[in-house]
Each structure stands twice: as structure tokens, then as C-alpha cells.
Image (cartoon, helix red, strand yellow):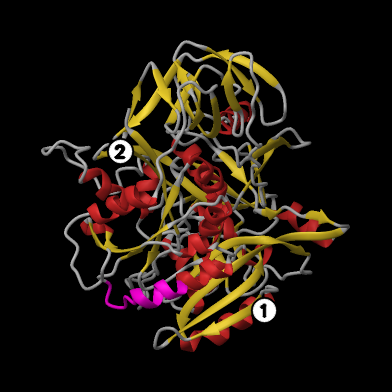
Amino acid sequence: MKKIINIAVVAHVDAGKSTLVDALLKQNGVFRENEQVVDCVMDSNTLERERGITITAKNCAIEYKDYKINIVDTPGHADFSSEIERIIKTVDSVILLVDSAEGPMPQTRFVLKEALKNNLKPILFINKIDKKDARPQEVVDMCFDLFLELGATDEQLDFKIIYGIAKQGICTTDLNQEGKDISPLLETIIKEVKPFEGSVEDKLQLQISNLDYDDYIGRLGIGRVNKGKIKSGELVSLSRNNGEKASFKVTKLFINEGIKRLEVKEAYYGDLVTVAGCNEISIGDTICENGTYDPLPPIEIEKPTLSMNFMVNSSPFAGKCKQSKFLTSRHIKERLERELWTNVGLEVEELESNDGFKVSGRGELHLSILLENMRREGYELNVSKPEVIFKEIDGTKCEPFEKVIINTPDEFSGTIISDLNDRKAMLQSVSNDEEGYTKLEFLAPTRGLIGYRNSFITNTKGEGIMVRSFDSYKPYAGEISGRKNGVLVSMVDGTTYGYSLFNLSDRGELLVEPSTDVYIGMIVGINNRENDLDVNPCKNKNLTNTRSSSADEAIVLNKPRTFTLEEALEFIENDEYIEITPDAIRLRKKILDPKERYKLNRK
């Protein structure tokens, strides 16, 4: 039996986690020599590839010398931080990746804090040392300060440092020596991390830390065997996270071999396994030997901070898209219930009106990923503006706050500070780490940051970088002003004409192009002023027998602005919906009839 070490690769977004895992897999014979391998092989679903981010934690395994090393590739975005909290409980150490130019970022702080809290001794990997603005020694000092700040023990402060370029699959323990391959990291792992110890004679104990789903065998529980061994076909006891007790038969058992799941008859202490046989299994449940109950401490699931309403599409275009398959409330309900099987950070409750559901998650990205998946699967729905979830703590109304780090050209810093002050953000520090750029750190209410990204891009002319991560719940920050621009709303059904859009372009920024089908109440542009304006985008030029000097002038229109799903969620106001179909994202008013809207506004 090989010695087993479980390692998690943790970092901030874009630090190179999945690229490092690629290098570990490629250099340890996981792929055939003639096999075509894509970059970031662990980012297996389409959305992960398109966005270049890891959305769900995934397991793989390599064999090095007489060790089996299970590797967990974790998400880097703050919206998926609850996965990291659970994963860290199943590993023996973490590889903490830090960009050699950026240094520690908000999510770096979070993942390191979780590792230290679980008494793990991290291995620090300074990545991208080939960057022009790389400053590896300075970044190591910054990381050491962060370890101290987070209360690391003397043993944890004696962390090993690896310098490397994950993309090239090379690393070194000494900056003066050029790396040749990834072996210095593997050698450090087997020297510094003690293999999991135990005995096959111990009674079984396995806690579920992650979930998956298979269309053929149902819900799957993933976790580390803490004690003893587990066999396929045996009857086991289950201690649920809520204290209830049950039992079930293990129908299938899998371990990781490379990037594949390998079905096995039994697995031993220390290994990461996937168990089938119980469709009610959940995060935190402990599997024990039949007839015994020895539960590990429950795993607390992070509560959602943001919610939005998912409703049946009620627009005049409902059902007109050829790719649409699922249109009813029942369809939406079934899809959300299926999502709850694996997405434990999500909460769903039915609205009183029975025409939709209140869906709560960890942030805009968390919820927009779900919406984008539903859209691609053929669902149609209307979605409301995201709202933060308030809490009462010690009798005080509190709301979620986020840590915001902004890197911007010096000339835009004053505008950003002013803008975020209006959104109740508190400036915590200002520094000039890079010539010509200012680094700003804020603590801001999530409520004030909804809709800010578009303004930020405009204010910095696309040159600024903003990073956000959940910090904590703090007392309610007071009223925050909303969007400063109104919208242009179609007052007719029909098809847009270049002539009418050209005349409307003076009024604001267009969201549609000529020959676009529109309906009454659909938003076709952004007004230059604060008020909403009903317009006719379907009016064509009157034909006459009289030839004028301007008759043959070509109409030149600016390219219309198109919203991604996240941008649309940030843009809309409380009286608006996003209409999501497989082929389009449209913005609309909740009340389509302009007369009804006018009556409501007068009240």
C-alpha cells in the first residue's frame, strides 16, 4: 500500500492554480505521449474554459516514488470560498500560490487563514517569476507578514518557499538556480508533509466534504477516509450533519487515478474517495462502520449574502426562441431542486405569488453561473435585481461588507475615492507600489458595490483593476443612491430601424441595432439624463416624391452596447427585469404598459 498525501492548491483568482496542476499531471505520466491535452485540464466544463476560472473543486492523483499524492484544485473566486473551507479539512497541507508581481490578494488572505486555522503548514509557491515587474523577494516578505498577522505558529512560520513558472512547468528552491522541471515541488511535498497515518483495523470513519451527481447512479459523496477502510457492497452507518442517524449500502466506490475516477472494491485510510448509494447524503455527514456512530464535528455551510428572484418569462417573446425547452414554473423548480443536490451554498424558497422562486447565493458570480448554465440548457426566465441579505446581530441590523482592492492610474484615484464614498465605502489604505499607479483598499457594503463595476470601467477608461471578497457583516450603512442614468424604453412593438435609432442616439447610448425585434416595455438604450424616457425605435423615414439634398446621406450608428449576464445584473434597477433566453439577454421594465407605469409612479 502506497503512502498517501493529500494536497490542496489554493490561491487568489488568476494566480495559476490550474496551470500548476497541469504541470504536475503532465510530468508524472498521467497522459500518453501522443495524447492531446488542453490547458487547465481540470477546468472541465464549458463555462470554466470560457471564463478561465475554476468554479468547482476537483480531485486528481499522481504517483511519485512510493507516494500517492491526491491533489485538489480549488476555486479562486470569493463567491466559492465555502468550498475551500470544506476541502481544507480533508488535506494534509496546501500549496499557497502567490503572483510574483501582485503579492498577497484578498482571497490569498482567506485561504491562508483557513489553512492556519486547521493546523496545516503551507508550502509557499511564488509563481510567474518571469514577469517584467516580478518582485519575488518582496512578495515573500509580504507573505511572511501575512502569516504573522494571521497568528501562525513558529512551525507554520518556517514555511518552505518554491519559485517557479507554472505555465512552463518549472520551479526551483533557489532564485539563483534556473528550474528544469516540477520535481523540486514534489520533493518538498514528500519531505515536509507527513503521510496520513492509520490502520486498516480501525473502525471506518469518513466525512463528506463535497458532492457530485451522476445521471445513472445518483448523488455522490466525496471525502477522505479518516480511519479504517471502506468496501463496495458493504452496509454502513450514517451520522448526519443535523444529528440524525441512518444506514445505507455502498453501491459504488471510486478513487482518483490521474484525472479519472477508478472504480475499486475497497479504499483505505488517508485516500480521497467517492461513494454512491445514498441519495440523501450531504456535506458534513460521517460514514461509519455498520452499527457504530462516531461522527466528526459538523461542517458549517456558509450562509448566502445575496438573493434574486427567478420567475417565469412573462414577456411577449416568451417561447419564441427555437432552442427554448423549459418555460414553466414547474420546469424552473425541478432544475433548482436538482442544483441543490450539489450546490450546497444555494438556498431556494417559493415566492408568495407562486410565479417564481427566491434564490440566495454567495454573490453575483455564484448566481450568474447558475443562470448561464440554465440558459444553455434551454431554460427561459425573468430575473430581478440582486438584493443583499440583511441579518440582525445583537439587536442591530447588519449587512454584508466586502474588502475591495483597486489598482488604478494615479489620475483616476480621486474620482474613485469620491464615487465609493457616495456608496458608503470606507477608505482603509492608499499606497504607490508601482510607478504611475495608486493602490486603494476599501471596506464597502455589498449593496453599494452592486452596479459599480460599469462605473469603475468608465472612470478608469478600462485601465483599472478591482478585486472584491466578502469580509464580514457590519451595521447597516444607510441609504445608498442607485443608478444615475435612466433608460430609453420602447413604447411600441415592432422591428427597429436605423433611421429612428440614429435620431435616438443623441438621447443616450443604444442597446439594440437595426432590424432588432422589440416590444412595449423593453429597454433599448441608456438615457443621458436621470429619468426614464419612452421612445419609438421602430419609426422609418417617410417616403416622398421630393428629392432633398440630404436624401442619399448614409446613416452611421455607433456600435450598440451589449451586456454580459453579470453586467446586466449590476445594471438593472428594482423596477426592471432581465429576460434570459437561450439566444438573448434582454432588459425590460417589470410593468410593460407605459400608462400603468406612469400611474404607479404618480402614487
Q: How many marks?
A: 2
Secondary structure under the numbered disc 2 in the rendered image: strand
Q: Which residues are magenta?
A: 131-142
- Up/down of 564 relative to 238, above or below: below
Near mark 1 (Cα within 10 A), the count class, few <14, some 14-19 or many ≥20, is some
Q: Amino acid at mark 2?
A: Tyr
* Residue found at the very far left of the displayed protein: 34
Residue 78, quarter of the rendered image: bottom right
Q: Is residue 134 left or right of residue 34?
A: right
Rendering coords of residue 77 (x, y %) = 49, 55
Q: Would residue 518 be visible to someone looking at this image?
A: no
Q: Nearer the viewer, mark 1 or mark 2?
A: 2
Residue 232, quarter of the rendered image: top left
* Label at residue 421: 1
Near mark 2 (Cα within 10 A), the count class, few <14, some 14-19 or many ≥20, is some
Q: Magenta stretch: residue 303 in it?
A: no
Q: Amino acid at mark 1?
A: Asn
Q: Residue at x 38, y 27 (%)?
A: 255
The residue that mark 2 highlights is: 67
Residue 92, quarter of the rendered image: top left
Among the two numbered marks 1 and 2 on one chain, the one whose residue lies closer to the N terminus: 2
Q: Magenta stretch: residue 134 in it?
A: yes
Q: Residue at x 42, y 71 (%)?
A: 103
- Up/down of 88 relative to 242, above or below: below
Rendering coords of residue 523 (x, y %) = 57, 57
**CA–CA distance in space, label 1 to label 2:** 54 Å
Q: Quadrant of the C terminus?
A: bottom right
Q: Nearer the viewer, residue 574 or 34?
A: 34
Q: Is residue 115 left or right of residue 298?
A: left
Q: Nearer the viewer, residue 167 or 362?
A: 167
Q: Nearer the viewer, residue 585 or 471?
A: 471
